[in-house]
Amino acid sequence: MKYTFVFAILLITSCNFSEQTESVKIGSKKTELIEIKDFPDNLKAKNIILAIGDGVGPNQITLTRIAIGGLDHRLFIDQIPYHGTSLTHSFNNVYTDSAAASTALSTGYKTKNRYLALDPNKAKLETIVEMLNKKGYASGIVATSSVVHATPAALYAHTDDRYKYKDISNQLINSSIDIALGGGQKFFDLNEINDTHHLLTTKDSLEQNFDHSKKLIGLFDDDGIVRSDENPTQRQMTNFALNHLNEQCNGFFLMTEGSQIDWAGHDNDANKMIEEFKDFDLTIKDLINFVNENNETLLIAASDHETGGLQILKQDTDKVIIQWGTGSHTSIPVGLQSYGPGAELFQGLMDNTDIHYKILEAIDYKNLENTTCNIPTK
């Protein structure tokens, strides 16, 4: 009876394992090649764009590539010329959450999971947005999650709990962030925001021009932005933010996040993940074109961590068979792509904290003078 019982357990485990696999159809779209320029090695960047694919590991990119155009297809992110690899562990854990990972990018320091721009002892860490504000930089954040979610929040908020959304929303309103676009209406008093910010709540508002007499905040959904024709995409919000920031400051810093790629990984939903990554990759296309037109902008495409333990197992006729290993984050190293002046700094294996310091090196931060950003209000 003992051996029969053990065999039954093994049989059930094997059946559950096979049920976790699913098939994704191989696409046939032709690769759209995009212009890639050479930049002089001695050219310093003025502007920084940090595009974060939340939860994106190598296989999230691979599966999207295959689903769109097949095995030999190339996404826009694939065409970025400089590639590196980033380790993601948090201060005291092989696994990181988005709060600790974004803190590493924002401040250059490891911290505990759930902490935002605080060190492990809860001392406040200066964020890259706060540092650049002293140098006359404008700054912006874009997210398909709420604007108080962990990745954007680590750029402006300091708290030992990423889920203190009301406190984080107050910190955003009082921060130096010039433009914030995403979801999260339920975390704000919209009437109160109108006193200090231009408030946008509809996709159509992205077609308007706003002066700089007030900061700008766009809240397009109650929490995360539900994908629909009525709501803006990451691509649309990012282009609007670029137009708003690209004015007369000493430079700008923009973080734009494909937040819900991560959510699809948590749900083990391959089709949703691919749909979210398509928006992210189209955003990358526009950012590459922006760099081509503006020779002083450095684009960095990064990930905070991998979500879901995604594996691509084999091909079955016109489909690939994939399997999720978990509904959580993993410690799989993630990719890093860069383009523009200073892009050569982001090659090889590095810690996620290194990305922060390489950004500062790319703009020659230590030689920037303290000043303020004075943009005409009209």
Image (cartoon, rainbow, N blue to C red):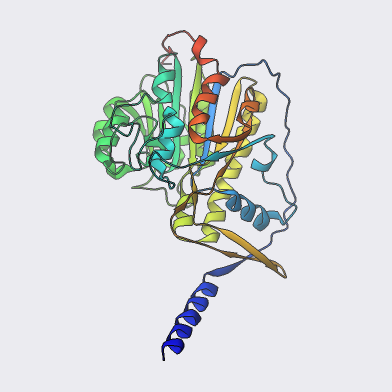
Q: Quadrant of the C terminus?
A: top left
- What residue occupies the far bottom of the structure in this picture? 1
| Image coords of residue 101 (percent x, y) | 43, 39
Who's the residue at 33% across and 27% down the image? 197
Image quadrant for the N terminus? bottom left
Camera-nearest residue between 129 and 185? 129
Above-or-below relation of 45 to 7: above
Asked whether 276 or 97 is in front, the reply is: 97
Q: Residue at x 37, y 46 (%)?
A: 221
> Does any portion of residue 205 appear in the rendered image?
no
Report x, y in % for residue 128.
43, 24
Residue 87: x %, y % from top left: 52, 40
Residue 332: give x, y in percent of width and height.
Answer: 53, 49
Of 54 and 230, the residue lying toward us: 54
* Residue at far front of view: 2
Residue at 43% over, 9% down: 370
Locate residue 315 relative to residue 5 in the image: left or right: right
From this viewpoint, is residue 349 visible? Answer: yes
Q: How many marks?
A: 0
